[in-house]
């Protein structure tokens, strides 16, 4: 047997020691040749720019619980780690570094800038993977991937070319979201919308070109009038019927354009009923422009300044031009007033800049054909969302999906594998760099400068990380993966895209289950952010309270379908749970000095009881983890380990442990067996504490050699007896003990006291069977069945019909005891009144299930009996 445990658990020492050993020993590794049913999770790759936050901590703790659980259960488990190149985010980090040095990326040039980014990635990019190790995650680090490593880059090119050749990727001119600060196109999902932005609605007049009058329109963006190519009215609006087909004259630019009728765009009841149309800078106007074949005039440059189309306003920033245009129109007498107006404004998630709708030529993926099978896979249950309500979010987006703009005007990322021929302008798309044009044979080829949206490569993650497009053994073994664990905020960004990418490229869904967890918020329910100052550093909490307490708190808080309101105080509370386990383990191991595994045993009642309870705990924990109810698993562990093993079985076992003979051997065997069960049962959630306990168990107890608890078999229900009778019996004794303790506490009885029992039938037999426990755990000097009259002065409590009587003459304040009994009698009579009222309700009795009504009748009978016994006890004190 190993040395005695120290008085306190040293979390930091255990975490440092065991993680290094686990990783160095290859315990996290997986081989497709290993035995066992495959079970695979691919980590949602954190940004290479990032550091560990509470969202990562929750997400990865839950994944690790599943992986450790399945690994112990005999599955061939693989957890693939990796990081995402995070195109915009990473480029911005390096550009800020250059700015501090007084250099721009344009001055460096593309090649030199990318060298800087790669150097930064090598220097700082492993920060988050080091931090994940501090969380105890058991990824197979030998398989760590990066979305721009050679293998994944090959997969990206392969998919791009495949989709292009299938006609699912195309280059087109469309209205897109433009970030004037980042100077790149953004997908709809990369734009945050402020729905309550307080702007203004400005009205102005366009003079009719024939000089016969004017038409008044309103806009929230005065500067875009520089790109107007029409004024639209409703065809049925009587105010403007005579104006349809006429032209207006632009008062600031030498340009005329028509008044058109459009019933889709125009609401006659809104504003003046006339709408300016800027097809190149508004999504609705873009559609109007296509319907009416209008010119598309882009009047802003990439930086958000007015270009040459804006005439004398050229060079002005868009917000400066807004003021200038209004002033110019006022000078011309065409300003018709301004009023406050709440509106929606889109901002870039990265730069925070107000996003500009602009017409641009970009690369797109046709989504309808790809979305259909991905939609059907969830509709038919091939892939399941947990909780199921997130299916509706997925369905809503997939059914109304639009083509995906995949090009980005960045330098860091997967450069689009397309080359333009300078001779014939043919677009050559290829996985390899072409030496000549496939159409004309020319050699004047220039590669597309744009890179792919980061999510394009992330969409391939479940299969590209396993070696695709090569037909690897890992791909054959572990695809499709088992479960995706992620937050609801990237169902559109990532989950949906992996679904259609996996089905289209692999012919199968990428995962069987999608578990969606909530967000970790502060204790007030607010989203954590640096600007609010409410961010919790998980590493700081781990450093203070230990990784096991931190992980247990995350699991305990992970209620399905709910966000987590985080409070570090709960980790402090759970650190006491860790200490409770440690102290219980010290008691067990300290009392094994003379343990002989081969010695004769006499299995006692409490040994049998705790084994039956352990079987129930195993069943409940297994069911909870299998159903992704991590909080239920954690709570069952807490209830069994602290409530049953520590508070009850350790106390029950002391008489036997401190004695001699077969009862002692049985108790020792049960104690060490329970400690083995507990270490294995809690390992997925609390890996370090469980390993520390496991290593200190006698070698003979460590199942299957047991080099590490993470490779020991997870407890199974079949390992334990099933006996409802013993549970009922011990539950009764526990209630008796609690009642006597409460009685002693209420009367402040410190000395050992006698106990008289009045009971009949099986209750009397059970009480006689447990006299030793009653004496030991209740401070009872002598226990006996009452033979004759009750003592004239005594305290009485009733448990399931059994009277427990403590003679009080000379040991207690009788007046106080009378007052206590009066209080209990009043409560019992209130219970009787409530139950009689319920059973007197004919509607309830008629409609409620018979077993429910019978239950209330039994409660009434017990309450009447208890009240009678209490009144009798009160009479004894008179």
Image (cartoon, rainbow, N blue to C red):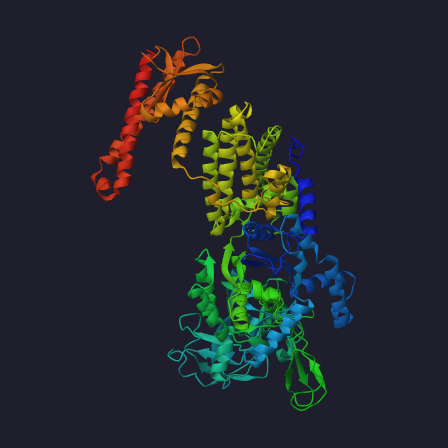
Which is more toward the observer, 220 or 812? 812
- Give how far across and how far down residue 625 sits, in percent: 50, 49
Question: Across the whole image, how many numbered discs are drawn on residues?
Answer: 0
Give the quarter of the image for residue 415: bottom right
Q: Is residue 358 left or right of residue 868?
A: right
Which is more toward the observer, 700 or 827? 700
Q: Is residue 723 left or right of residue 37?
A: left
Farthest residue, direction bottom: 440
Which is more toward the observer, 163 or 521? 163
- Give how far across and how far down residue 610 sits, in percent: 48, 34
Give the quarter of the image for residue 361: bottom right
- Give how far across and how far down residue 581 sits, in percent: 57, 35
Q: Is residue 341 left or right of residue 93?
A: left
Give the quarter of the image for residue 582: top right
Quarter placement of the C terminus: top left
Query: Can residue 566 be seen in this snapshot?
Result: no
């Amino acid at each position: 047997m190993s040395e005695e445990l120290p008085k306190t658990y040293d979390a930091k020492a255990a975490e440092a020691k065991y993680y290094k050993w686990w990783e160095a020993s290859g315990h996290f590794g997986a081989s497709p040749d290993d035995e066992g049913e495959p079970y695979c999770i691919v980590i949602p790759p954190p940004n290479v720019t990032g550091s560990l936050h509470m969202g990562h901590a929750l997400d990865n703790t839950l994944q690790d619980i599943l992986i450790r659980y399945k690994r112990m259960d005999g599955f061939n488990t693989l957890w693939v780690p990796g990081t995402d190149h995070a195109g915009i985010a990473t480029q911005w980090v390096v550009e800020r570094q250059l700015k501090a040095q007084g250099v721009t990326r344009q001055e460096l040039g593309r090649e030199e800038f990318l060298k800087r980014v790669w150097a930064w990635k090598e220097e700082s990019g492993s920060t988050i993977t080091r931090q994940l190790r501090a969380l105890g995650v058991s990824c197979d680090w030998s398989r760590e991937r990066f979305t721009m490593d050679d293998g994944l880059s090959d997969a990206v090119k392969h998919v791009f070319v495949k989709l292009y050749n299938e006609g699912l990727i195309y280059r087109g001119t469309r209205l897109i979201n433009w970030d004037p600060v980042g100077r790149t196109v953004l997908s709809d999902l990369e734009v945050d919308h402020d729905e309550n932005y307080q702007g203004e609605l400005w009205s102005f007049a366009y003079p009719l070109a024939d000089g016969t009058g004017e038409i008044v329109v309103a806009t929230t963006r005065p500067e875009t009038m520089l790109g107007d190519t029409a004024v639209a009215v409703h065809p049925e609006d009587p105010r403007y019927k005579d104006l349809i087909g006429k032209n207006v004259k632009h008062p600031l630019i030498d340009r005329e354009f028509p008044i058109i009728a459009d019933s889709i765009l125009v609401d006659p009841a809104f504003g003046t009923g006339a709408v300016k149309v800027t097809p190149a800078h508004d999504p609705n106007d873009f559609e109007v422009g296509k319907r009416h074949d209008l010119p598309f005039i882009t009047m802003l440059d990439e930086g958000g300044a007015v270009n040459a189309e804006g005439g004398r306003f050229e060079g002005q920033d868009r917000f400066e031009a807004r003021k200038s245009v209004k002033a110019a129109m006022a000078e011309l007498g065409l300003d018709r007033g301004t009023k406050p107006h709440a509106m929606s404004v889109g901002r870039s998630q990265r730069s925070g800049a107000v996003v500009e709708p602009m017409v641009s030529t970009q690369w797109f993926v046709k989504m309808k054909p790809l979305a259909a099978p991905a939609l059907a896979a969830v509709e038919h249950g091939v892939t399941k969302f947990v909780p199921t309500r997130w299916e509706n979010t997925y369905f809503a987006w997939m059914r109304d999906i639009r083509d995906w703009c995949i090009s980005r005007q960045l330098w860091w990322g997967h450069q689009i594998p397309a080359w333009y021929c300078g001779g014939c302008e043919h677009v050559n798309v290829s996985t390899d760099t072409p030496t000549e044009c496939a159409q004309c044979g020319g050699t004047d080829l220039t590669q597309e400068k744009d890179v792919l949206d980061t999510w394009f490569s992330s969409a391939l993650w479940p299969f590209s990380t396993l070696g695709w497009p090569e037909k690897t053994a890992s791909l054959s073994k572990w695809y499709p993966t088992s479960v995706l664990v992620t937050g609801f905020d990237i169902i559109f960004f990532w989950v949906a895209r992996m679904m259609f990418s996996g089905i289209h490229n692999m012919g199968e869904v990428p995962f069987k289950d999608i578990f969606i967890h909530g967000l970790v918020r502060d204790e007030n329910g607010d989203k954590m952010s640096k600007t609010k100052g409410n961010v919790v550093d998980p590493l700081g909490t781990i450093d203070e309270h230990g990784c096991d307490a931190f992980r247990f708190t995350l699991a305990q808080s992970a209620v399905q379908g709910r966000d987590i309101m985080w409070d570090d105080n709960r980790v402090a509370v759970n650190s006491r749970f860790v200490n409770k386990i440690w102290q219980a383990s010290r008691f067990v191991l300290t009392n094994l000095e003379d343990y002989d595994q081969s010695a004769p045993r006499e299995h006692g009642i409490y040994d049998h009881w705790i084994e039956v309870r352990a079987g129930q705990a195993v069943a409940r924990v297994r069911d909870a983890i299998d159903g992704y109810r991590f909080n239920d698993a954690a709570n069952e562990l807490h209830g069994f380990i602290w409530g049953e093993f520590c508070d009850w079985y350790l106390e029950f076992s002391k008489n036997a442990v401190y004695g001699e003979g077969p009862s002692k051997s049985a108790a020792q065997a049960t104690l060490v067996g329970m400690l083995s069960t507990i270490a294995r049962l809690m390992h997925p959630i609390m890996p370090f504490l469980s390993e520390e306990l496991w290593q200190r168990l006698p070698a003979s107890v460590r199942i299957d050699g047991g080099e590490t608890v993470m490779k020991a078999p997870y407890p199974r229900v079949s390992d334990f007896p099933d006996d409802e009778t013993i549970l009922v019996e011990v539950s009764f004794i526990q209630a008796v003990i609690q009642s006597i303790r409460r009685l002693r506490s209420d009367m402040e009885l410190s000395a050992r006291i006698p106990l008289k029992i009045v009971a009949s039938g099986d209750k009397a037999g059970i009480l006689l069977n447990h006299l030793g426990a009653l004496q030991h755990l209740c401070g009872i000097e002598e226990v006996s069945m009452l033979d004759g009259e009750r003592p004239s002065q005594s305290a009485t409590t009733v448990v399931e019909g059994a009277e427990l009587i403590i003679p009080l003459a000379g040991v207690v304040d009788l007046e106080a005891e009378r007052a206590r009994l009066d209080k209990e009698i009043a409560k019992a009579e209130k219970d009787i009144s409530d139950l009689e009222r319920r059973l007197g309700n004919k509607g309830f009795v008629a409609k409620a299930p018979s077993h429910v009504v019978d239950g209330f009748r039994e409660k009434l009978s017990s309450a009447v009996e208890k009240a009678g016994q209490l009144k009798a006890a009160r009479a004894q004190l008179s």
